[in-house]
Amino acid sequence: MKVSLQTVRKYVGFDLPPVDELVHRINEQLGGVEEVIDIAKKYEGIRIVRVVECEPLEGSDHLHVTKIDDGGATPDIERDQDGLVQVVCGAPNVHAGMFTVWLAPGVTVPETFDKEPFVLSAKPLRGVVSNGMLASPKELDFGDAHEGILEIDPNEWKPSAVAIAPGVLFSEVYGLDDIVIDIENKMFTHRPDCFGQLGVAREIAGIFGHQFTSPDWYTTMPVFDVADGLHLEVSNEIPTSVPRFMAVAMRDVTVKPSPVWLQAELVRLGAKPINNIVDVTNYVMLLTAQPMHAYDYDKVGGYLGVRLANEGEQIALLNGKTAVLNSADIVITDGKRPIGIGGVMGGSDTEVSDDTKNIILECANFDMYTLRRTSMRHGLFTDAVTRFTKGQSPLQNDRVLQFAMQTIVNISGGQQASAVVDDFSHPSSQSETDVFDVAFVNERLGAEFDVDGVCELLQNVEFETSRVENTKMVVKSPFWRTDIDILEDVVEEVGRLYGFDKLRHDLPRRSIKPAKYDDRRQLKQSIRDVLSRAGANEALTYSFVHKNLLEKAEQDTDDVYELSNALSPDLQFLRSTVLPSLLDKIHANVKSGFTHFGLFEIGKGHSVFAGRDEQGVPVEQTYLSFVL
C-alpha cells in the first residue's frame, strides 16, 4: 500500500515529523514499511516552460523548431539574444503560447528512471541543436499517451500555491516533490479502511496523538438530486452476495486526458492515468479504499444487473484476456450478457473510450469470500480485488459515489441524468459496545488508563465515546471500521494507539494457591494408569477419518458429519466413535506380525444423532475404546 506524505499532510492538519521518525512509529504502531520512495528525485530539474516561437523544421514533415521561455532558471544552457532556449519537437500539438514541460540537458527522462536511466543532452536533429526535449505524458511516466507533449492549462486548479509560470519546477507545482511510503499489504489484512489514503492518514494522526477529522463529504449522509434524461434500470438477483449495489447515469461527459493535478496524484500513488473518467474512479478508490467502475451507457443500453454467471459463459476483459465463467462467479450484466466480473474487472466491450458521451457509474459492495474464490480461480489479482477481499463497509458507498459524481462533473462537464439507484438489502449500523468498565481495558493491557484517556485515544481516530459513570463508558465504532466486533477489539485498539511498547512489563498478579483437581481429568488418568500397568498401549488418532474406514468398521456413514473443507481426501468425515480409528491401528500391527497386544484410546466422537449445542456446533462426546 503506497502512502503519499503530501496527501497525508493535507488531511491530518499538523506537521509530520522527519521521515525516519515517522517510519519508526508506523513500524511500531501501524504496519511494516517495506520501502521509502523519494518521488522528487524522479522529477528533479524538470521545469514548466512557455513555448514562445514554433516554426516547422526545414526538410522535415513533422519536426518543429521551438523557442521556449524558462524564466532564465536553468544555468549553463545556450540561449538566444532574448534569453530563449531552442528545442526541436516532433509533437503534433506543439504550438506557440502553450505551457508545457521541459527536460533540459542533464535531466533523466522519468519514464526510464527505475529502469536504465536515460540522461538528456544537447544534440543536433537534422542539423539543428535541440537542448533537451519537450515531454509527452509517457516520457513523464504519466501513462502511455505519447501522441503529443503534455499541455498545461495555467488557469486549472493545482494542489500547491506555486503559480504556473515559466521556469517553476514541475514537481513543486503538482506535488511531485513527495515522499511515498510503501507499507506491506498483509499488515492491513483486517483493516479495509487502511487501503485508502484517508484511512492511513487517520491512523497516523491517531498514533501521534492528534484528532483526525474526515472531510465533510465522507462523514455527511448525502442527499442525491432527482434527475432524468437517461433511462436506467438496475437489478440485483443475489443480495446475499452483493449487499449493496448503487448506480447512476451521467450524460454529456467529455472524455479526455485528466487535468495534470489528477494525473500527478495517480502517479504518486503508483497508478497510471488513462482518461478523466477512469482516472476519477481510480483516484476515489485510492483515496477511500472503495473500488468503483464506469461503463459506457450507450454500449450497455440503460440496464445494469448483477447475478451469478451461467456455467461456461465467457467475457472479454479489460486486460485483453477472455474468462470462461463458473456458476459461482458474480457478474455484472446488461440484461443479455456479462459485461464485468463483479468486484474484479470490467469487460472490454463496455469500457469508457474517447467516443463515450454518457456513462453509468457503479459503486457496490461484494461478499469478500466469493470474490476471493473468483480471483483465485481466474488468476485475477486487481486493485479492486485487493480491497474487496478485506471486507469493505457498505455504509460508505453512497458518500463515495456522490464524491465521484461531483469530481466527474468538475473535470468532464457531465451532469447527473438519472436517479441514483440504491439496492441495499441488509442495512447495517455502526457497532456499539455494551457499557464496560475501564478496568476491563487495564486488566488486559497492564495499564492504568482512566476513562478520559481511553476516550481521547479512540476519539482521535473518530470513534464515538461517552462516559456513563466515573469508570464506565460506551464506545461506538465508525462506519468504516468493519473489524470492531467484540470488546477485546476495542482493547486492542487502545493498546495500539497508545503504543504496546509503552506498556509496563509487570507480570499480572495471580494466586499461587494450588488449583482444585479436575475430577474428569483424574478419572482419565486413572484409566490410563490401570490399562498401562496391564500392558496395553495408548493410541492418539485424528478425529477425522476416511469414509472407507467407517464402512470397514460397519458404521453407518449417515450418522457422521462430512467436512466441506477437509484437510485432505483421507480426512473427510468426523468419526462418531473412536473404535474405527483404533481398529485401523490394530490392522496395521497385525500385518506387521504382532499378534498379542492391547491398544486403547480416550478420544472424541461426533454423532449426527447426538445433535448440536446452542451455537449450532456438533456435540462432542468422549469415548474409551479398547481392543485386545
Image (tube, rainbow, N blue to C red):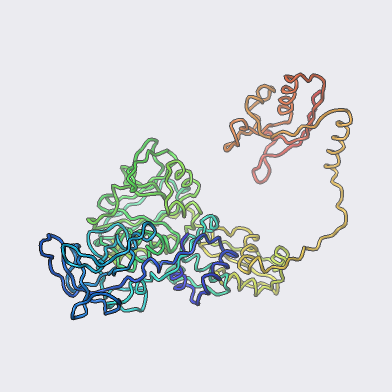
Q: Is residue 474 left or right of residue 251?
A: right
Q: State the image quarter where residue 108 is shown.
A: bottom left
- The residue furthest left is 59
Image point (36%, 68%), residue name: 43
Residue 365 visible to the viewer: yes
Image point (58%, 31%), residue name: 569
Q: In this view, does 368 lie above or below 41?
A: above
Q: State the image quarter where residue 179 is shown.
A: bottom left
Q: In this view, does 268 lie above or below 157?
A: above
Looking at the picture, tell me which residue is in the foreground, 18 or 61. 61
Looking at the picture, tell me which residue is in the foreground, 334 or 524. 524
Residue 406 visible to the viewer: no
Image point (48%, 45%), residue name: 370
Q: State the image quarter where residue 54 is shown.
A: bottom left
Q: Is residue 120 left or right of residue 201?
A: left
Residue 424, image x, y percentages: 44, 55
Residue 68, image x, y percentages: 21, 74
